[in-house]
Image: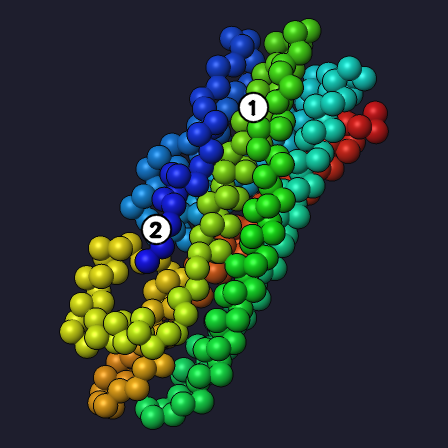
């Protein structure tokens, strides 16, 4: 089985603590506090499921952008960034905000499409009777949806690569006053941690789809029949997507016992219910973040128009 990166490994090593000037504006300090919450969350999130961990991260990121809006709304910040010599910072922020909006919107649409397929499969399983093979076409549609989501998330990952280390990458200006210096630093950290969270989300959604090859599903079937699947899942930290893949693959295996087949249907339903809840949480988190990113972009465009 392919070894997947841990949640911590998905985060950029460049996300560090900030040392702000001693007289930073209280709004800037509040942005720093939200950044530190995200860093603390990342380091203590290993005990939760991946989807749950990412949902919490998206929520914290939305709150961070709410604080960023407060910072950009300060007359002191707007006056500083609207000066001609500081336009490059605003241009870089605008470029980043557009990429984040695209990644957020495209990912939300992919997850919504995936959730629709999950619910169709749930409905088919509720109607299925033991010995009925009609669910196979719906399972195939689910697998196709997974592959499509994997393809779309790969595109979003590629679009974020040019942003790594870009904001502020040319070095800080020597003539920045304390306030603008603090603003540039927290905005740079925000950009880095936004990319990191998107990486974690997209890597989770683009994990390889388990293909229903006979040899692989025979192994899964044997594990289920021996009562060893639960132990296997615990040892390998099987997440929501892979858990559904395994349950569906086992469901497609022919059973000699009607009782065993009924158990497999029930297991698949439980797995799909959990995945549906996870996808719903991701959709809500992405929608909230999308709105925040739009507001941030509006503030930046207003600064450019001054």
145 horizontally vs 7: left or right: right
Residue 286, position as x, y percentages in the image: 56, 51
Residue 93 appears in which quarter of the rendering?
top right
Residue 224, position as x, y percentages in the image: 22, 73
Considering the numbered disc 2 on the image, is that residue within a helix, a strand or a loop? loop
Residue at x 44%, y 56% (from the top left corner): 207
Residue at x 34%, y 93% (from the top left corner): 131
Residue 266 appears in which quarter of the rendering?
bottom left
* First in residue order: circle 2 vs circle 1: 2
Q: Is residue 175 visible?
A: yes
For disc 2, the neighbor class at 10 Å (few under 14, some 14 to 19, many from 20) is few
188 horizontally vs 200: left or right: right
Front residue (pair 165, 211): 211
Residue at x 68%, y 6% (from the top left corner): 175
Q: Is residue 108 visible?
A: no
Residue at x 54%, y 27% (from the top left corner): 189
Q: Quadrant of the C terminus?
A: top right
Front residue (pair 270, 144): 144
The outermost residue toward the right is 305
Residue 265 appears in which quarter of the rendering?
bottom left
Q: Nearer the viewer, mark 2 or mark 1?
A: 2
Residue 284, position as x, y percentages in the image: 53, 54
Considering the numbered disc 1 on the image, is that residue within a helix, a strand or a loop? helix
Q: Quadrant of the N terminus?
A: bottom left
Q: Which mark is residue 3?
A: 2
Q: Looking at the image, is 174 positioned above or below residue 118?
A: above
State the separation of the CA atoms marked 2 and 1: 34 Å
Q: Looking at the image, is 5 positioned above or below residue 183?
A: below
Residue marked by disc 1:
186
């Amino acid at each position: 089985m392919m070894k997947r990166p841990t949640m911590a490994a998905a985060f950029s090593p460049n996300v560090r603590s900030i040392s702000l000037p001693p007289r930073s504006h209280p709004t800037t300090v509040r942005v720093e506090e939200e950044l530190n919450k995200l860093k603390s969350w990342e380091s203590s999130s290993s005990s939760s499921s991946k989807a749950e961990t990412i949902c919490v991260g998206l929520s914290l990121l939305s709150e961070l952008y709410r604080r960023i809006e407060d910072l950009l709304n300060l007359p002191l910040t707007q006056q500083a960034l609207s000066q001609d010599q500081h336009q490059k910072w605003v241009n870089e922020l605008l470029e980043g905000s557009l990429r984040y909006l695209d990644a957020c919107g495209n990912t939300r649409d992919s997850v919504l499409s995936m959730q629709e397929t999950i619910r169709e499969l749930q409905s088919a399983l509720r109607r299925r009777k033991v010995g009925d093979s009609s669910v196979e076409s719906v399972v195939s549609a689910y697998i196709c949806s997974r592959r499509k989501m994997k393809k779309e998330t790969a595109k979003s990952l590629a679009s974020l690569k040019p942003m790594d280390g870009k904001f502020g990458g040319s070095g800080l200006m020597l003539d920045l006053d304390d306030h603008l210096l603090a603003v540039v630093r927290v905005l740079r950290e925000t950009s880095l941690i936004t990319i990191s969270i998107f990486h974690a989300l997209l890597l989770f959604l683009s994990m390889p789809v388990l293909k229903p090859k006979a040899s692989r599903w025979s192994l899964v079937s044997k594990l289920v029949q021996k009562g060893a699947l639960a132990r296997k899942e615990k040892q390998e930290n099987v997440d929501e997507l892979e858990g559904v893949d395994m349950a569906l693959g086992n469901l497609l295996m022919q059973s000699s016992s009607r009782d065993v087949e009924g158990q497999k249907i029930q297991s698949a339903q439980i797995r799909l219910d959990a995945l549906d809840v996870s996808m719903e949480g991701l959709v809500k988190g992405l929608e909230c973040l999308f709105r925040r990113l739009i507001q941030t972009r509006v503030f930046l465009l207003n600064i450019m128009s001054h």
